[in-house]
């Protein structure tokens, strides 16, 4: 069961770090990014520290706002956000042909929302890999609460050097996770190594679209906001993503940006021009209320110093994502299915 209260949010900020370290951790995280004078090479060289700090700081906010699955999804008209997220997860299971007896890897599993949903849907045995100790601990707790500890396992580790032997898994997927990789080719090579020959890897990637203009100052500002707000070393283009898949050794079965023909924009939950009661906490009004609550809790010392700054980082994320979606220069819904040759 997802932690849903404001106090759960406040007590969870910082993950397993000492709560006295939260404020300095936010400052260190911010300084990795161009918005605060940081640069791409420093982020890539220190990606593990940067991404760990990010998820230690924001996971309780994510769980408060999104529930257990921290990702976007294309939506049909009349479909709720929760329904679209489940359908998105079921789709990847169907594309991989998951079924009972298969050994599957979720790369960058977070607290395991998609992992548990896909395990229920497919009856496959799924291992989640994540480099955040806090998220792994929380995910195992949720696995147990869901009665899925036997079919769902979680392992702490780095997807740039995965702790699995060659040719281990019958299928591998990643949902909006490998965008954190400092070197996507290196990440895909690790996935290729761990996958059995003849089997498939499917992913939803965060990418810049063909509309992104690197000489456009407004486009670069939006890109920087997304990187800051979402713990990214860089954002690759769809073409760069697909080329890396091929260079890693995979055969691309098919690929598509599902944001292109989504009847409901993927960024709608964050759009300040709309209001939804079913996903109220994600709306601009909901985020303002959340920010006021956490500032109050921080003032009375129920939330650690720096909690308000974490909320501000996530506001930057929402701003950048909505801008990127409206300008059609960014997508979180670039899907591909690839096969490892026999």
Image (cartoon, rainbow, N blue to C red):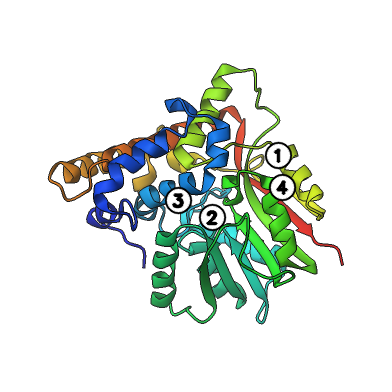
Residue 52, numbered label: 3
Upstream in sequence: badge 2 or badge 1: 2
52 is higher (above) or lower (below) than 44: below
The residue tagged 2 is: 84
Return the disc, 1 or 4, that comes first in the chain's sequence: 4
Residue 228 bears which disc, if any?
none
Secondary element at tag 2: helix
Could you tell me residue 117's position as x and y percent? 53, 68
Residue extending farthest to the right is 342
- Reading the image, the residue beneath label 4 is 185
Distance between the alpha carbons at the discs numbered 1 and 3: 25 Å
- Judge depth for marks 1 and 4 and give the one in front: 4
Q: Nearer the viewer, residue 319 or 171?
A: 171
**Dot 1 and dot 3 residues touching (CB under 8 Å):** no
Mark 1 or mark 3, whichever is nearer to me: 3
Residue 182 image offset from top left, x and y in percent: 61, 43
Is the residue under label 2 in contact with that under label 3 (CB below 8 Å)? no
* Residue receiving disc 1: 238
């Amino acid at each position: 069961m997802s932690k849903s209260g404001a106090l759960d949010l406040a007590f969870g900020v910082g993950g397993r770090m000492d709560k006295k370290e939260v404020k300095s951790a936010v400052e260190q995280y911010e300084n990795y990014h161009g918005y605060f004078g940081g640069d791409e090479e420093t982020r890539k060289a220190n990606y593990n520290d940067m991404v760990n700090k990010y998820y230690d700081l924001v996971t309780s906010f994510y769980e408060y706002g999104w529930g257990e699955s921290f990702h976007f999804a294309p939506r049909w008209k009349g479909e709720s956000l929760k329904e679209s997220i489940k359908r998105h997860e079921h789709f990847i299971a169907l594309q991989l042909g998951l079924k009972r007896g298969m050994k599957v890897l979720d790369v960058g599993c977070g607290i395991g929302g998609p992992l548990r949903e896909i395990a229920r849907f497919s009856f496959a045995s799924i291992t989640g890999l994540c480099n955040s100790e806090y998220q792994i601990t929380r995910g195992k707790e949720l696995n147990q609460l869901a009665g899925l500890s036997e079919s769902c396992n979680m392992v702490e580790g780095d997807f740039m050097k995965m702790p699995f032997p060659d040719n281990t898994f019958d299928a591998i997927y990643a949902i909006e996770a490998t965008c954190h990789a400092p070197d996507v080719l290196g990440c895909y090579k690790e996935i290729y190594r761990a996958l059995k020959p003849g089997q498939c890897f499917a992913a939803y990637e965060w990418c810049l679209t063909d509309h992104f203009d690197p000489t456009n100052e407004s486009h670069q500002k939006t890109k920087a906001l997304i990187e800051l707000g979402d713990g990214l070393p860089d954002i690759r283009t769809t073409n760069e993503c697909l080329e890396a898949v091929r260079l890693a050794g995979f055969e691309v079965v098919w690929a598509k940006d599902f944001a292109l023909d989504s009847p409901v924009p993927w960024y709608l939950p964050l759009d300040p021009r709309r209001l939804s009661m079913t996903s109220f906490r994600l709306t601009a009004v909901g985020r303002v209320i959340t920010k006021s609550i956490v500032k109050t809790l921080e003032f009375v010392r129920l939330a650690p110093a720096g909690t308000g700054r974490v909320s501000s980082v996530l506001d930057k994320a929402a701003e950048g994502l909505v801008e990127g979606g409206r300008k059609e220069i960014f997508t979180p819904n670039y899907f591909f299915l690839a096969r490892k040759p026999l």
